[in-house]
Image (tube, rainbow, N blue to C red):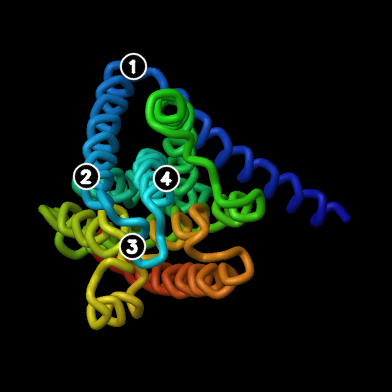
Amino acid sequence: MLIEFNNEVKGYVIMSAYFYLAKMKLLVFLSYRFEVFTSLGTNLIVVLANIYLWKAAYKGIDSVAGVKETQMLTYTIMSTLLASFFSVNIEHALQERITHGDIAIDFFRPISILLKYLAEDIGIAISSILSKLMPLLVIMTVFVQPPVPDSPMAFVLFLLSAVFSFLILWLISALISLLCFWVLQLGEMKTVKDGIVLLLSGKIIPLWLFPKKIQRMIEILPFQYVYQTPLSIYIGKVQPEQAIVPMLIQFAWILLFTSLLCFGWSRARKRVLVQGG
């Protein structure tokens, strides 16, 4: 009984530590008001440019690939809102710890390093919702059009799919960050990764507008499940009864990337222990 009680207390303390890390990141990022206003202005310019672009593309056309103009505008607005929410910092944070040699100390802490970074990135994401996503949503609703979901069920499935999307993006970033244990500096690798995600995820251009052959090639990659899957559910391109398959694929990618991350992390840990004695 005493052992079980101690385990429960230990588990509670560890979970409280992760919650505290997330809360501190939330408070820190909310304190940078200039960055908040700058990011809001940038996102506003991007979404307005995309809206006018799609308005011009749809001029005289009722629908493209079964998607109406109002659906495409909603897609554009929501993709920008999602991008402001998908804030991932693990690559920079882990590289800093490795470069300065502090990562060896982290291995002796009573909490998981990866879960620590995940908790911090969740805190950053929550702060982005409050400081970037919500103000931009209000502006778009008042001055452009309210990005209304296709149905209440579509909205619920969109939220769950968006959480899966965040985890996929975070796991991809975490896998890239593991390379720091071998190359120390990622260089432009993060920029390349971000560019590939933006191009092949449907964030800028929905993948259903790509040629069929390219669509088939992209379908075997995980990137479309970062943006296009939740956005397609939101606008009704994928109906709720059809959403279960892509969401299961999202979950499968999460399991695969988690397994790869655990394997890679165990190899990286051995490398640090060997180098550090």
Residue that numbered label 3 is attached to: 64
C-alpha distance separating marks 1 and 3: 40 Å
Secondary structure of the residue carrying tag 2 is helix
Q: Nearer the viewer, residue 101 or 38?
A: 38
Of the residues under marks 2 and 1, which one precedes in the sequence? 1
Identify residue type, mark 1: Arg
Nearest-to-viewer mark from 4 and 1? 4
Of the residues under marks 4 and 2, which one precedes in the sequence? 2
Residue shown at the point (28%, 17%) measured from the top left: 34
Q: Residue 112 at x, y = what percent?
A: 49, 53
Residue that numbered label 4 is attached to: 74
Nearest-to-viewer mark from 2 and 1? 2
Identify residue type, mark 2: Leu
Secondary structure of the residue carrying tag 1 is helix
Q: Residue 38 at x, y = what percent?
A: 25, 23
Residue that numbered label 1 is attached to: 33
C-alpha distance separating marks 2 and 3: 14 Å
**As drawn, is 259 to the left or to the right of 179?**
right
Q: Nearer the viewer, residue 199 or 264?
A: 199
- Residue neighbourhood size for the residue with mark 2, other residues' Cα within 10 Å, grouped as few (<14), some (14–19), many (≥20): few
Q: Nearer the viewer, residue 11 or 244?
A: 244
C-alpha distance separating marks 2 and 1: 30 Å
Q: Residue 2 at x, y = what percent?
A: 84, 52
C-alpha distance separating marks 3 and 4: 14 Å
Looking at the rendered image, the quarter that the C terminus falls into is bottom left
Residue that numbered label 2 is attached to: 53
Identify residue type, mark 4: Thr
Of the residues under marks 4 and 1, which one precedes in the sequence? 1
Nearest-to-viewer mark from 1 and 3? 3
